[in-house]
Amino acid sequence: FGLQSDFKRALHDEEFYLVYQPKVNANTGSISGVEALLRWNKNNQELIPPADFIPLAEETGFIVPLGEWVIKRACEQNKQWQDAGFTPIRIAVNVSAVQFQRSKMDEIVERILAETGLEPQWLEIEITEGTLMVQDEFTIRSITRLKELGVIIALDDFGTGYSSMQYLKQFRLHSLKVDRSFIQDLHEHHDRAAITEAITQLAHGLGMSVVAEGVEKDEELEFVKSIGADEIQGYYISRPLSKEDFESYLQSDS
Ligand code: G
Ligand code: G
Ligand code: MN
Ligand code: NA
């Protein structure tokens, strides 16, 4: 059908690409990781935001080959940066609930790591609360095996979905990303600050690290640092960058 062939053609014609947003250590400000974000330059004319096409890709099932392409591209790129002599960093990719339900994510990731030669600790997978809520056999097994492989797992957009303490206890993930809706102007909204602080304490109590995402302002940065957030991501540090601009960022960081 139309949409499906459009997607297929776009993947074949290399209209999809990744942009890279740095995550930095909250104490030192030096780079600690990078999130790879998908972009679609449709017919090389029109930039379609992921919020528009990812739901369609999920409905049609195209998210499976597309998501596999994202992981492959991200691992390949991170290995290239390491081979070029940059300080090794983790690269994070977003994986949606549908990908876990419709494919064997553990096998896909294991194969891609072998093909690209990237060691598992340099790959991070960002999942959402929705993924954990499903509780299907495929998903649980994949997440367990990915952890055993040594891949890092982060819980993205934390606090916006079906935040359940049960999932945190069951899965023992590496980090929590506090959703940017709580970070935004938290110096002017006591409730947002209180939630951010509580999530940070919860995560630390469970041995997880905390990423504050969507940090744009001085006041937001100062607050999240004061409560002990481990990593910072947001426009304050950098917008998502092209491969070339991200390489300049890496160069100036070291
Ligand atoms: O980059 P941007 O802010 O436009 O991303 C919008 C949304 O799309 C975010 O929720 C992000 O997690 C999601 N997204 C971006 N890249 C990918 C991807 O490669 N796979 C999946 N499943 N989601 C992505
Ligand atoms: O859902 P997820 O966390 O994967 O979404 C990441 C998206 O959030 C990225 O695509 C990026 O474009 C966006 N983003 C990152 N930092 C900021 C920020 O400081 N402000 C805003 N408004 N968006 C941000
Ligand atoms: Mn994310
Ligand atoms: Na997020």
Image (cartoon, helix red, strand yellow):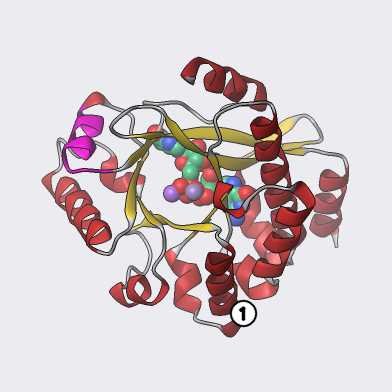
221 to the left or right of 7: left
Residue at (15% x, 42% y) in the render: 189
Q: Main secondary structure of the magenta part?
A: helix
Frontmost residue, 137 versus 77 = 77
Frontmost residue, 100 versus 123 = 123
Residue 114, placed above or below residue 78: below
Secondary structure, mark 1, is helix
Residue 125, placed above or below residue 134: above
**Crowd tier of the residue under label 1, counting other residues whose Cα lies within 10 Å: few below 14, some 14–19, many 20 or above:** some
* Residue stretch in magenta: 219-229
Inspect the image, locate mark 1, and give the three-letter code of the amino acid beneath it: Phe
Task: Find disc 1 in the rendering and name its residue.
Answer: 138
Q: Measured from the top left, where is residue 104 in percent x and y?
A: 69, 72
Residue at (24% x, 25% y) in the render: 218
Frontmost residue, 45 versus 172 = 172
* Image-quarter location of ligand 2: top left
Q: Measured from the top left, where is residue 93 in percent x and y?
A: 58, 49
